[in-house]
Image: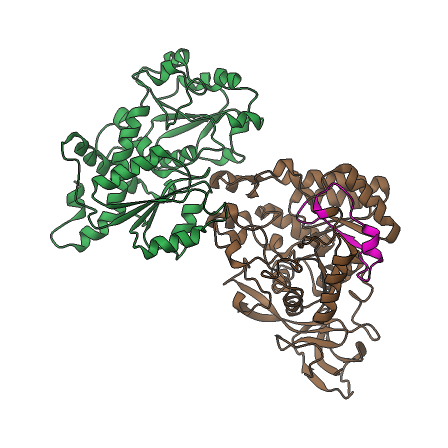
């Protein structure tokens, strides 16, 4: 394993310091370190953050390897500064058994670019009818603690209640995709001014908010932990704020795209903007930013959702929902939160590393950048200005809404337990001498 | 004028009046024994219909043939949804065949916009109705009909004329195109519908909204009835067909309350007994059949101006505006 001496990095945006990385941990941190190292990195002007943790990633394997594999997805994660991702359960077959979650977990180990923590389905086949073997998935090598039917809502109140109660036995959390199904039949985009004009079926905010309101009450009633996936409306923020004020154990995430984009983009009918939950209004975007800044929303989660070209190169109505996001997340957060003064880099580390790791109960991630801690680290250049070019992505898919957009910042290097996965912006094969 | 006609919003007031005036000239053809013009000779127009529509398709086909275009009917019903050929591959095929214009009817809102914005094909795209979005040639033929009755004469618009549109606005592409075009032409639009059949956000549309048909009748120069599909009843948009008819249907009693000069329009197909009674549909004040005839003239004018313009300008000795006037 190579050792690295990182010179003049700004840890969490603080004053420049040197960081010695060796044997998988931070060995020394200080100014003017004299230690010997195999590789020296000039990090002048770069911000050092703990390796990012994504609570919401679709790696598509098994089943949709044409869209993404665990290998390409973790490569994309590394390029985005991530050292751990939670792989969502809506694969083919669904990750609703110990066998499937162990397969995904093992593929992650083999990849080596990023830790892969599988998410288990709440119900068999994501059908919302019968609890999957949650305990078996937890007891498996994958050690599942986050359970989600993401893509579908656990809409049956009794099933949701039981799931919330049941996972308490192993400190699990149910991550809910909040979408009342009857209110969103035929839904194509946010229901509002734009949907009315475009003649596209509306996905009303109330369909998200009604489920969140029910779920926080259920979680309070049974004393369980609830996590709300991809919060997208101002009303949802209000409900979560209220639940937290009550002291209930509720956490929430927001995607980068909901922090930056609005439903006005749908006027192009370009399905690259089709996503679930849909892009909302500018007022929602502002409420989400404010909620992330004040901590009502705990985490940024990408909802990285790769799709092959043919599933987006078509009419809006038949296009797949979702956007890739791992490789642009930190840049979007810089633009939406840091450059606007809403969050400093310490806050970014909290929302993109510390808190998501804590929600997922990932012991080795989201730790401080201090001596003795596992060396999960990202070096980010916030001064960089460039145009998003999807052809340079590591993900197998190209469905990014940021194509051609100027976004600030770039990941310079990523370290997973002391091993470089990205150097000078390029992937490094794990174990390969730098 | 733009190269495509995807939305009624693509048309400026001048564009719209040019189309109406051109259609007025072309309408005189239908009175002649020989109804054909050579304008689009050698040009290929494809009718790409993903959805059944005998009326609109026939109307376009007649218009194309009267302009001597080579007409290809591309039956593409259901292709993309049923995982047959994708819209993209269909478009590439049409491009390879040298389509100069594609008239597209699609069940998905925005499909014509996708075609027009893509580099899949280079010809003009004419929206013949997309999902619950727009149907701009219907709005044009409605405006043409309105002008003939309410403010006849070349160059005239619809300033101050009051048009009341009744029915399923939520799912109506006719309503969306009409509210845009009628505003462009200076008319005042009122939508009348049960609240369940009005889209969220309609308060910001350039129109008035009422839930009460009877209250709107006296202030109406033209009443446009929209088709209401019986299936909507099952989705709880309204309780029963009879209740809908009572509250929002057009019958003889309501016809009597309209000002004497007012007309009753319907884009067809009519559901007699639902939104309109036979008594009204068959009355001389109902323009449904006249609208069909006007549809051919309007579609000729659109094709003529979108396609003919370039060719005529290129050909020595011909002049588009001369031909149009």
Q: Position of residue B92 (x, y in %)?
A: 38, 56
Q: Is residue B19 visible?
A: no
Q: Residue at x 57, y 43 (%)?
A: A190
- Residue sitting nearer the eye, A96 or A57: A96
Q: Is residue B59 visible?
A: yes
Quadrant location, the C terminus of chain A? bottom right
Q: Is residue A49 left or right of residue B282?
A: right
Q: Which residues are magenta?
A: A125-152
Which quadrant would residue B128 be assigned to in this image? top left
Residue A150 is one of the magenta-drawn residues: yes
**B17 to A296, vertically: above or below:** above
Which quadrant would residue A153 be assigned to in this image? top right
Quadrant location, the N terminus of chain A? bottom right
Q: Position of residue A332 (x, y in %)?
A: 61, 61
- Residue sitting nearer the eye, A36 or A131: A131
Q: Residue furthest left?
A: B317
For the rendered model, the colour scheme is by chain
**A145 to B271, vertically: above or below:** below
Q: Residue at x 58, y 61 (%)?
A: A66
Q: Position of residue A296 (x, y in %)?
A: 74, 50
Residue A338 is one of the magenta-drawn residues: no
Which quadrant would residue A42 be assigned to in this image? bottom right
- Residue sitting nearer the eye, B121 or A69: A69
Q: Is residue B297 left or right of residue B132?
A: left
> Majority secondary structure of the magenta segment?
loop
Which chain, by letter, is green? Answer: B
Colour seen for chain A: brown
């Amino acid at each position: 394993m190579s050792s690295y001496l990182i010179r003049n990095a700004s840890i969490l945006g603080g004053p420049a310091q040197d960081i010695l990385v060796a044997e998988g941990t931070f060995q020394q941190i200080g100014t003017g370190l004299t230690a010997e190292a195999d590789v020296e990195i000039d990090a002048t002007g770069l911000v050092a953050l703990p390796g990012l943790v994504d609570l919401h990633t679709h790696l598509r394997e098994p089943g949709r390897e044409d869209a993404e594999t665990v290998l390409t997805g973790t490569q994309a994660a590394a390029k985005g500064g991530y050292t751990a991702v939670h792989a969502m359960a809506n694969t083919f077959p669904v990750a609703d058994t110990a066998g499937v979650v162990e397969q995904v977990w093992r593929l992650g180990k083999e990849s080596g670019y990023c830790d892969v923590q599988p998410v288990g389905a709440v119900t068999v086949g994501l059908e919302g009818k019968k609890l999957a073997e949650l305990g078996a998935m937890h007891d498996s090598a994958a050690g599942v603690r986050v359970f989600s039917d993401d893509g579908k809502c656990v809409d049956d109140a009794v099933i949701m209640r039981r799931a919330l109660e049941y996972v308490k036995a192993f400190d699990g959390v149910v991550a809910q995709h909040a979408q009342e199904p009857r209110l969103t039949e035929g839904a194509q985009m946010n229901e509002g001014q734009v949907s009315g004009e475009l003649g596209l079926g509306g996905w009303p905010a109330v369909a998200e908010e009604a489920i969140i309101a029910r779920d926080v009450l259920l979680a309070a009633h049974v004393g369980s932990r609830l996590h709300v996936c991809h919060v997208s409306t101002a009303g949802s923020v209000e409900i979560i704020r209220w639940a937290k004020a009550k002291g209930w154990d509720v956490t929430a995430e927001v995607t980068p795209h909901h922090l930056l984009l609005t439903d006005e983009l749908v006027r192009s009918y370009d399905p690259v903007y089709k996503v679930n939950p849909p892009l909302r209004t500018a007022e929602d975007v502002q409420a989400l930013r404010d909620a992330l800044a004040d901590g009502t929303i705990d985490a940024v989660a990408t909802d990285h959702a790769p799709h092959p070209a043919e599933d987006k190169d078509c009419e809006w109505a038949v296009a797949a929902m979702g956007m890739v996001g791992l490789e642009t997340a930190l840049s979007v957060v810089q633009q939406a939160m840091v450059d606007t003064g809403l969050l400093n880099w310490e806050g970014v580390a909290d929302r993109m590393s510390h808190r998501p790791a804590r929600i997922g109960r990932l012991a080795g991630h989201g730790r401080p950048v201090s001596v003795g801690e596992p060396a999960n680290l990202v070096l980010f250049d916030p001064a960089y200005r460039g145009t998003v070019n999807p052809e340079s992505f590591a993900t197998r898919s190209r469905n990014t809404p940021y194509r051609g957009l100027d976004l600030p910042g770039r990941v310079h290097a990523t370290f997973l337990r002391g091993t470089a996965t990205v150097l000078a912006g390029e992937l490094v094969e794990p174990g390969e001498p730098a | 004028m733009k190269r495509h006609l995807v939305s009624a919003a693509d048309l400026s007031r001048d564009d719209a009046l040019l189309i109406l005036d051109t259609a007025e000239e072309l309408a005189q053809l239908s009175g002649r024994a020989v109804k054909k013009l050579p304008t689009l000779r050698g040009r290929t127009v494809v009718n790409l219909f993903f959805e059944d529509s005998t009326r609109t398709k026939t109307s376009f086909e007649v218009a194309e043939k009267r302009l001597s275009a080579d007409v290809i009917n591309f039956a593409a019903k259901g292709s993309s949804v049923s995982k047959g050929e994708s819209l993209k591959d269909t478009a590439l095929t049409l491009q390879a065949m040298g389509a100069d214009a594609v008239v597209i009817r699609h069940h998905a809102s925005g499909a014509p916009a996708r075609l027009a914005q893509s580099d899949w094909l280079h010809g003009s795209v004419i929206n013949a109705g997309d999902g619950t979005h727009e149907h701009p040639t219907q709005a044009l033929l409605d405006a043409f009909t309105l002008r003939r009755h309410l403010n006849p004469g070349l160059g005239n618009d619809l300033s101050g004329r009051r048009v009341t549109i009744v029915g399923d606005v939520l799912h109506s592409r006719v309503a969306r195109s009409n509210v845009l075009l009628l505003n462009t032409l200076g008319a005042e639009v009122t939508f009348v519908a049960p609240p369940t059949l009005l889209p969220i956000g309609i308060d910001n549309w350039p129109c008035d909204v009422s839930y009460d048909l009877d209250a709107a009748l006296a202030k109406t120069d033209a009443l446009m009835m929209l088709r209401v599909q019986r299936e909507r009843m099952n989705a709880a948009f309204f309780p029963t067909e009879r209740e809908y008819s009572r509250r929002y249907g057009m019958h003889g009693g309501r016809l009597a309350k309209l000002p004497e000069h007012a007309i009753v329009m319907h884009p067809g197909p009519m559901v007699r007994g639902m939104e309109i009674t036979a008594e009204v549909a068959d009355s001389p004040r109902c323009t449904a059949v006249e609208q069909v005839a006007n549809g051919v003239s309007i579609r000729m004018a659109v094709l003529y101006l979108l396609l003919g313009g370039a060719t005529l300008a290129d050909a020595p000795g011909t002049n588009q505006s001369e031909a149009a006037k």
